[in-house]
Structures are given as structure tokens and as C-alpha cells.
Image (tube, coloured by chain):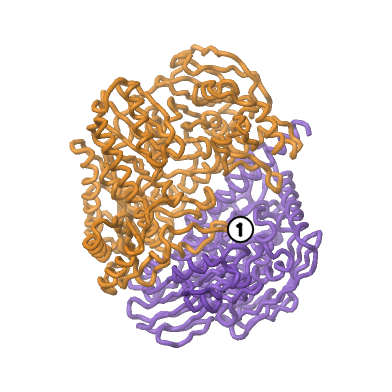
Chain colours: A purple, B orange
Amino acid sequence: MNRHDALSEIKMQIMWNRLLAVVEEQAQTLMRSAFSPIVRECGDLSAGIFDLKGRMLAQAVTGTPGHVNSMAESVKHFIAKFPVETMREGDIYITNDPWQGTGHLNDFVLTTPAYHHGSLVGLFSCTSHLIDIGGIGFGPDANDVHAEGIYIPMLKLAENGVINHTLMEMIKANTRMPVESEGDVYSLAACNDIGCQRLSEMMDEFELTDLDNLAHHIIENSRQAVLNRIADVPNGVYRNTMTVDGYDHALDLVATTTVSDVGIHVDYDGTSPMSKFGINVPLAYTTAYTVFGLGSAIAPDIPNNAGSLGPFTVGAPTGSILNALYPAAVSSRHVVGQMLPDVVFGCLRQAVPDRVPAEGTSCLWTITLRGQVAGRNDAASVTFNAVTNGGTGARPGKDGLSATAYPSGVRGTPVEITESTLPVIVWRKELRPDSGGAGRTRGGHGQTIEIESSNGAPLEILAAFDRIDHPPRGRDGGADGAAGYLGLKSGEKLRGKGFQDIPAGDRLVVLTPGGAGLGDAAERAAQSIESDLKDGLISRDAASNLYGHNVD
Amino acid sequence: MRTRLAVDIGGTFTDVVIEHDGTRRTTKVLTTSSEPERGVMQGVQAVLAEAGIGAGDIDMFVHGTTLATNAIIERKGVVTGLITTEGFRDTLVIADEGRFDQYDIFIDKPEPLVPRYLRLPVPERIDPAGGIRLALDEGAVRAAAAELVGQGVQSVAVGLFHSYVNPVHERRIGEILREEYPDLSVTLSSEVCPEVREYERLSTACANAYVQPLMARYLTRLDKDLHELGLACPFFLMTSGGGLTRLETAVRFPIRLVESGPAGGAILASRIAAECGLDRVLSFDMGGTTAKVCLIEDGQPETARTFEVDRAARFRKGSGLPLRIPVIEMVEIGAGGGSIARLDDLRRITVGPDSAGAEPGPACYGRGGTAATVTDADVALGRIDPDRFAGGKMALDLDAAASAIEASIATPLGLSGTMGAFGITEMVDENMANAARVHAVERGKAVGDYTVIAFGGAAPLHAVRLAEKLSLDRVVVPTNAGVGSAVGFLRAPVSYEVVRSRYMTLSQFDAQAANDVLTAMQEEAEAIVRAGAPDQSLVERRLAYMRYVGQGHEIVVPLPVRALTADDVDLLRQGFVTEYEKLYARAIPGADMEILSFALTVGTPPDAPEALTSVADGALAVPTGRRQVFDAEQDAFVDVPVYWRFDFAPGARIPGPAVIEENETSTFVSARFDAVLNSGGYIIMERRAEAAKEAAE
């Protein structure tokens, strides 16, 4: 290699590193300026840079695997609608179309063409979850997507630097929280602006006029690295079926995973058809969570881009719940979509058992409440999402994590913040002993949560929970995790999905599921059992009956 | 001239600095971890002997230490219990329910300092407005206390919900504990961290409780030893927030002492910024294992209220235990001289976060280390003279450096050894530049026109490249860069910051309530500062942490130092909009704003620094020799003159490229920069006019 090539090799590496820093900066800008609590407290956002072919070059590492491929796909849709030769500096494109974006109307996707000395060189895209977009509110009760809120096709939010105020007025008129929604749209726009600016500075520094060589370098190196990892996985066809609660009846999620020299393909043939309710999943979102599961097990340290994601492909039958079609209701698509890493792990454990955990809670247990707030004159009621979680599945050699989000990476909401924002008092939020499935390694524990209205007015819950009828299943002799539960303190059991009232004076009781155990509980280290006993995380009965431990 | 003494205990070395009769003397002794006061006394006696004075001649003593931090990291604190609100026994474990690494299935979360069997709930409940929803069950408190003491607990944290609004239940529990167990150490969360967000507050309270008895014993012993040596002056402790506090406060809230060393470095940089008349400074501290970057504006380092200690995954945000205390805000990454370079699966060069440390150290130390490090790359590129490292006390092995780089980087990539070395330094400099850039964005700033102030052993070698990458035009390398933190201690004001949460929206602004909180805070801070500065005039700073209603991140809005009136709501609104636009360009029309917390600092005014000048008098410095050094901008080895820093006088000019050597470090001046020695003896590197113009084009 001559010195010129050697230098360019080093420069390529430096520039790749820089692009990752640029998208990180982009995401930080969004997180810090967002209004939507689920974005700023929980990190429900995504940001990335794309070349002019719509190939993703770098993506910020944020809390939402659901945006992994879906945002990447959406940029391709934008380019199809607004061909690159028609783009102008100062344009911003927007949509919340679940099938062209990231799977439900709450996610607004903005794409901004990036210019360098007057030439179009790339695209920045970002997405975040807006707290209210009108319709019946964030929950699975709608029967079609139009009941779920405002539907924005692919439009120009700005043209040549001029904001489309008509569109902005339409957005504001179609939400219960117009100020916050407008603020969130501006915050998305600002985050892409930062990316464009930094990219241009980098191109000056490295004397680039386009990103072609850099894109090739990133994509080819990443693709090869992932293919090398896949080569370590035994070729074969691995099948798994998982049953989940669904809305009104149980659903089968059926996966066939084919590992070959050219990649890993997951096909969901045999999966249940679409639901009448808003738990349907557009294919882009199915792909996102499937690829997240594959990536975590096979290539966790390789950054996301068109090259690293390319060898992982996904298919699902048209009209199945994992490839739902317009106008299906999709608001709570995460409830089913977040199950998919566990479905994929069930396939992979037949090939690489040491790399994947037992089943866990999988979907977030986001408690969405509506209540009346004194002193707010801009809305009669306020909606609040308190993100909570159950336990994750036991891991080879390690216990599962208690009260931890997986696969979603969003963070939980502090109780003191919940109580300061919404007229509720949380009487209990602590670990739920005996909920983690017994095993050589134990599942993570779920939580026990009790919530009451604090101002004498009733509350409404917009429930979207799973794993109530179908708890996480134990693996290799490990026990199942405890099932989730939703009810009132006075005794009534509530449904896992849909609007329900919590009368004033009564308490909502939520038990989040425990993760499943892995391996024979009799093989668990006595020291671990004793430590769990001392901490009150397992009962004496469990120690003796499930683990065969002498408790005397 | 006052005589001042400073001691900084670090993980490896204890640095001692004495300033007497306008002369500064420094020494380094090994830290004696089991009884740190032994190392301190040894170092103090050494500098006193050198200065030819007695302990009684010292007018001021300042101490900073990482002992509290190390006790937490090594889990060597005392057996600690927690009494908390019933229903919330697991707040420390539930934490934020997140994972610090999205893709790694096998992460370990940080172990809480207090295990579950020592976290005991008691019935009581206070709401966010301070109302008592459930009275405190004192019988349950007594039972819990008995249980904890029976389990061998020596220190108890009390952390109840919304105690930052109404601490009455926490205080009552404190009374009961002291009444029944006078020897027990007690930390109330409402005293150590009166702020909203239960996990951070309880984590801070438990950490304080965990180290309190240890720190109290250590500080008391040291105080006694120094007293016996004849020291009669006040004893100050450096806090993480950059102020000095008296022993009594440090003993109560030792958690405020974590990160005091780096805070000292930032104070030093602030002082240099003031001396050199620099408004915007990027302080760059690069040592053996980490690099730290801190932004300083108008002589004030950026401050924050959260710090993470004991990160399970090094330098990974979210993998540590959060402490909500006033800190000087800095970003720290695993990029130091000893940081190890290797190739990842994508054949990318990665540097750090792990370090070869001092043993075995970089390959060129010849102590058996085989990993290629940043120092090895600096040797291979000619930036470090292998024969004059550490003042010639330690010869470096150039061949060992070259073979380590070839084996792990160059050969697998098909590059020459030099190119491999260049790849390592480029990557580490890039990582530091990226960290600085993202850090600035997180603080709502852009580093565009900042000056780099470089200290720490490795910083002077890498500072100019960092400046080039950030398009900065000026770098300052001060004297005594190797003991920067301890020198910084001597420049810190006696000051104390109090932060309290008090929620109110501006549409329902309650001036009386704000004044009540601020007055109480002022009294608390002034009482603490007065103990250390009984006669001096004091300055006060008041801030509000505000956001739009519904937003998550607060921004800092300055408040006038006087009682607020109802009319001040406009001032607050305007102040918020001004700060918001600085951060995010666009304010949101019509949105209501809310105040979450207030911060109030009382302190002595900083000494007016002597203004330093840096006019080149035209004299060119004379090199002591020449050697081949690789220059990044020219992509080639170039014949570079080498200078001895103490050979020439202020005003002398050194055109780049050049290497300026001294005992603890070397400064590399690139071809695009010139260096001049200012009147304080600091090296000032400035981008040459033509180079500056090129960069702008």
C-alpha cells in the first residue's frame, strides 16, 4: 500500500468515526429540546444520515430498536416521492404515515436534504414520538388507522427555507396538545439542521465533494463484518412459535429462520392474521425488531447502517398481524412488535444457545393514564405515559435483569415526576418477589405497582399490556416467569387491553411479568438462592419447592 | 506574601504544592491507600523542608482527595442501611429501568450500595405539594432501626418520597435514630440532595452514608496529625463544585468531595483564562488513562448537578451510580497516554478505554507491556524523545513501541509502522475532538472560537492536533502542568452551593414562596462559608432551573440577588427565552414555563489575577537539537527543531513545527502554529495568519 492509500484508509476510518459523532449530536439535540416526555425522559427517538441512494450510513444509538430499519426504509420512500433532482436547499419533508414511516401515527419522521457548497450531498432523517396526535388517544381501541389521529402523507414541511404554516396549523388543530406538538416538530427540524451543518464542516475539513467513497467504505466493511459473524452460526433452518395474548384472542407468532452463507432470513409464515384492534404491525416495524434481535445475538458491536443491516432480511405474509395493511389500526404495534426478538431468540437458541436469553416480559408496560388537572387551562384533561417494565429472561451464565426494558431501551419514569405531572399518587412500585422464573439462572423480577387518583376525580387507563395469559416460557428446564396482571385494589380484574375506568378512591394494581428461568433450578448455586432468600426476593416456599433448597 | 499549601490525593500519586514568598514548590509521593494521611504527611514534610519553613508558617491549607470515590468504586464503605417510604423498597435497583447498552444482552447493572435486606420501608407518605397523605409510623421506624443495627449497620440513609418539599418525616426519623443510637451515622436525603427524582436523590443519600464514617475518621486523623506538626491555619476541602469548604461540612457531606481533583484542574484553567484574558476556554486535561474536557466561559467553568460514579462499563453514560451534587461539568473519555490501541472486527483502529496503566505500561516502557498505546505511537512518530522521557530518568524503547504497533495495527492493515502510529494518534485525537464537540452541544454551545488550555502529562503533545480538528486557533500550555489540580486548589474561592427543588409555573408565579426558599438557602450557604471566611466580603449567585411546561430538561436562568416581586415574572420569562434561544435557536411562542429548582452560591470573590502578556519581542529561540517528527498536516516526517523550555525568556518566538521539551512533558507545535512564551512562562501556540486563512477557506 503506498502512502497515499494508507492515508486515505486512515482518513476513511476517521470520517466514519466523525459521522457517528454527528448523528449522536443530532440525537442529543432532539432529546434535549423535545417536549414529548417519552422522548426526553425515555429516549424514544432516532436520527441518522443517508446517502443520495437512501442508504443509511450512520444512526445514533438511542432507545428505540423499532426505528432501526423503519426510519431507513422511510428515507427511501421520501426519495421516491421527492426525487433528489427536485430537492432544494431549505426543504424539509415530513410524514407520520405508519407504512412509510415508523409504524404508527405518533411517530413523526422528518427528512432534510444536506447541502455542501450548494450541492446536495446526503440526507438527514429523524423521528420522535409525539405525545398526542388527536384521534381516540394512544391505545389499541381503534378499529382503523383514521380513528387513531391525524394522518400526514409525505409533504413538504418547509420549502426553500419557508415553513409550511398551513400544515403547521393543521397539525396544531388536530392535537390535544398544540403547543407541545408544534414544539416537537420544530425540535425535529432543528436536529436535522445540526446534522447538515456538521456534515458540511466535516467535508470542508477532509476536502470532500461527495460521500460516495466514504459510503462505499462504511457499507462494504460493515456488510463483510456481519457476514463473518454469520459464518460462525451453523447453517440451517430453525423454527419457533410463540403465543401472545392479543387484544380479544390469542395470537401465534411463527418464525422460520434460515441461516446461510449469504445472510439470515426470517419468515413469519403461519403467523395469525390482522386484528380488529390497534395492535397490528406494519412490515417495516416487524423488520426493525426482528433485525434488532438478530443483531444483538450475532453482531452486537457493529454499528447500524445499510451494510450491516443488509444481510438480515425479513418476510411476513400480507395481511398477517406482522404485515398489516392500510387501513388497519396500528397505534399499539409495539405490544406485538416487541415480542419479536424473543421469537427470533427461540430460533437462534437451537443454533447458538450461549448467546441468547430465555423469554422475558418483552413489551413495555407503559401505563397510559388520563386524569383531570387543576390549574391547566389549555386542556380539560391530561394524558401521561408512565413507562414501567417487567423482568428480562435469564441469560446463559447470568440472571435476568429485574424491572428493565428489553428489547426497547426507553427509560422508566420517576414516580416523583409522574406525581408532579398527573393527579395521581403511587402507593407502591417495587420488585415483585417470586416473579422471576426459577432456573439455574433466574429470570429478572417484575414489579408491583399501585396507583390512585389524588384529587378525588376518577382516572382512565388506556391499557396495552401483554404476557397476562401467556407468561414468558422457561428454557432448558427453567420455570416460566410470572404472568402479568391488571386489576383494581377492590378486587376486580381488568382487561390487558383497552380503555377502562379507575373509580376515585380505588387503586389500580399492576403486576408486571417476571422473566423466564434458564436451566434446571436444582443446579442453581446455593449462594445465589440464599442471597435471594435473605433479600426477600424469593419466598421460603419457592426456595424449597422450586429450587429444592434446604431452608432450615 | 501568604504561604499556602495544597495536597491532592489521587489513585497513584499524592501531589503536594506549596507557595511561599512568591515561589512554588511541588512534590509527588506515592499514595498510601490504607492510611492516606501517611503519604500526605510525608509529602508535606518534604516541601516544608525544601521551602525551609515550619508548619506554623502556613496561612492556608487546601486538601482534595479521591478517597470517597475510591471507597465507592472498591465497595469499601461501611455497612449501610436505608429507611424509605413503604412501597418503594427497590428504588435503588429499579433505577431508570433502562440498559446502558442497547445491543449487549449480557450487561451487568451497577450493584446498589445498600442491599435489599438493609433497605427497610416505613409507612408514611408526603405528596408533591408537601401535604401529608399518611402520617409517619414511628413504631415502624424504631423497629427498622433496631433491625438495621442488629445487622451491623453503622450508617443509615433516610430517603422518603417528596422530602425535598417537606422534610418533616425525614427529620423526625433522624431524631429517633440519634436518640436511640447516638453512634450511628445518619444522612437525610432532604439535606444532602433536596431535589426531585427519587432515584438520584436516594442514590446520593446512600453514597453519602456509605462513605461518611470513613471520611470522617480519615479527615479527623489528618487534622490531628497536621495539628501535631504545628499547622494552625484553617483546613479547607476542595469540593467537586470547585469551591472550598470547611472540615465540618466535609465531614457531614463527604459526597461533595468526589471529583475534587479534576475540579482543581478546571479551577486552574479558569485562573489561567483570567490571567490571559480569555473569555472562552476549552480545558483539556490528558493523563495516563483518561482525557477530560471542560468548557470555561468568562472565567467560570460549566457546572452541573449530576455526576456518575463507578460506571460498570467505563465511561459509558448510565452504567454508574448517579450522584446529584454540584459538580464542575466535564466529559471524561478513555483516552490517555496509556490507552491501548487495537483493531476491531471491522478493521477499525480503536483506542481505549482500557489502559496499560503504569505497570506494565506502554510497550516502550520495556516492562513487559506488549499492547500498543498512544505513548508508543507518540514515540514512533518522533514526538517524544525516547532518551529524554521523564527528564531522562527513564529511557524508552523505540523498537518495542514500533513492533507493538506493527503487530497489532500496521501489519494487519497493510500499513507501514509509521502510518499505523499515525492512525493511532489520529484516532485518539479524533475521539477527543468528537467528545468535546458533543459535550459542547449537550451544553448548548459550539466550540468554534475557544482557546485550548492543555495540562496533564499527555495533553501538550496532543493539544495542537485537537485544536486543528476543532478549528481552534490558540493553545496555552501552563507551567507545572503535571500537578495542575493541586495548584488549582490554591486558586479556588471559599464557596458553597445549595440547590433546592420548589416547583411553580410562571403563570402561577409565587414570589413569596420563591423568596422563602431562597432566603433559607442563603442562610445555609452563608453559614458554611462564614466558617471559612469570617471577615471577607462575599459574592452571591442565584439561578433558577426552568423549562417549558411539559419539557424534560431544565435550563439555567440567572436570577437577581434580591427579594423577588410579582413583577419579576416578566424578568424570569425574558431570561428563560434568552437562554433557550441560545441553546436551541427557536423559542416556542405561547408556551407556559415552570421553575423546578433554585440554586444559590455564596463565595469569596476570586483574587484578581495578574494580567499576563504574550507579545513576541521578535527574538527567535535557539534550538538544542533537531529530530525527525511526523507532521499530520504535511503527511510526512519533517526535520524539526527541539527546544528546552527553560532555555529562553518570555517573548521569544518558536515557529512550528517544533518540539518544546521539559521534564514532565513535551509540547508539540505543528507546522501551522507558532509558539511564544508569555510573561508568565506559559507556552502560547497561535495558528499562523496564512494557516488561519487557509482554514477559513
Where does residue A315 sit, x and y in percent of width and height? 74, 70
> In this figure, what is the number of numbered marks?
1
Determine which residue is flagged by label 1: B104
Q: Chain of mark 1?
A: B
Vertical comparison of B352 with A110: above or below: above
A505, B332: nearer the viewer: B332
Q: Which amino acid, mark 1?
A: Asp
The percent coordinates of residue B398 (x first, y second) are 65, 26
Residue A88 percent coordinates (x, y): 64, 51
- Where B94 sits versus B340, above or below? below
User: Does residue B11 sit above or below A78 in this rendering?
Assistant: above
Q: Is residue B568 left or right of residue A316?
A: left
Q: Is residue A534 left or right of residue B422?
A: left
Q: Quadrant of the N terminus of chain A?
A: top right
The answer to whether residue B206 of the structure is visible from this angle is yes
Residue toward you, A166 or A58: A58
Residue with the most extreme left position: B535
Secondary structure at badge 1 equals: loop
